[in-house]
Amino acid sequence: MPIKYYLQPNPITPDPNDQMARVLPTAILTINDIIKRVLKRGTTVTEADATAVLLLAFEEMSDAVAEGNHINTDLVNLRPSIQGVFTNVSDSYDSSRHTLRASVSARLQLSTKVSQSRVEKTDGSVISPDIIDFADIRTSTSTQASPGGIGTISGSELKFNPANAAEGIFFINTATNAETKATEIAQRTEGKLMFSIPAALVAGTYRLEVRRAYTNAATIRSDAYDQLITVA
């Protein structure tokens, strides 16, 4: 199956004719979807066993990185990193200016698989939300969220109708698929959303989605931020 993409104006370069590619997701898969794909290969492992092992592995890998370890796998490398500016050589970590985060980089197996994929250009006339960036104001990061704090999303086609329960900003827990909707919206324009990050978010990793209705509210289209969001 090819990776489908379409072109849209590039807001970064000065040339107004420049375009950038936006990849359309074939689907947004959860860990349960991946397990079902594994089971189709004919393994004798049960779905319950596969789920238990993977969730335990994820937990142990998260603990290991939080302890300062680097993890190298055939798929990705994981390591802890520190974000922020240190004013001089005598400066030390300050949680008000610096942030601990997990860094992820693709390994050869993943990079090779993706680089060998076929691509297919599609018609970009089907408009939908496009998340370019997320920012957590409290931590000044793009991959962490502070429950009760302020978050911003930049992109295009972001202005949704808050009166429609199916539209809005959603945090989806990657472990449980539970959805938490942001209900306090301070700014709502086509290019930017500013909102209160739900205080009910528990520790874990989340997909961030913006959903918007089209065609007289009959069609919901969404976009997911291309990085997972961590809640400590």
Image (tube, rainbow, N blue to C red):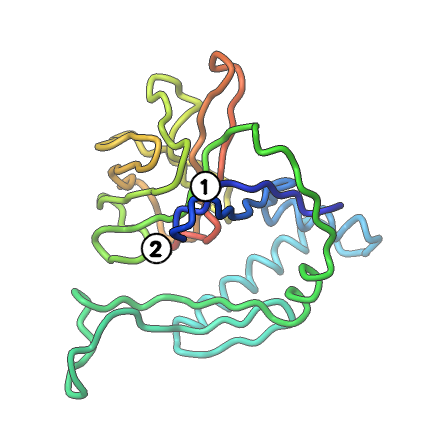
What secondary structure is marked by label 2? loop
Numbered marks: total? 2
Mark 1 and mark 2 lie on one chain; the one further toward the N terminus is: 2
Task: Name the foreground residue: 14 vs 52.
Answer: 14
**85 or 78, which is in the foreground?**
85
From the image, tell me which residue sits under label 1: 172
Residue type at tag 1? Ile
Q: Residues within 10 Å of mark 2 (few under 14, many from 20)?
A: some
Instruction: Provide the residue designation for mark 2.
Output: 142
Residue at (81% x, 56% y) in the render: 43
Question: Does residue 141 appear to the left or right of 230 in the view shown?
Answer: left
User: Is 216 placed above or below 12 here?
Assistant: above
Find residue 47 and report its horizontal and vertical position in percent: 70, 49
Q: Position of residue 68 (x, y in %)?
A: 39, 78
* Distance (Cα) linking label 1 and label 2: 16 Å
- Which residue type carries mark 2? Ser
Mark 1 Cα within 10 Å, few/some/many (few <14, many 20+)? many
Indicate the quadrant where residue 33 lies: top right
Against 104, is 172 above or below? above
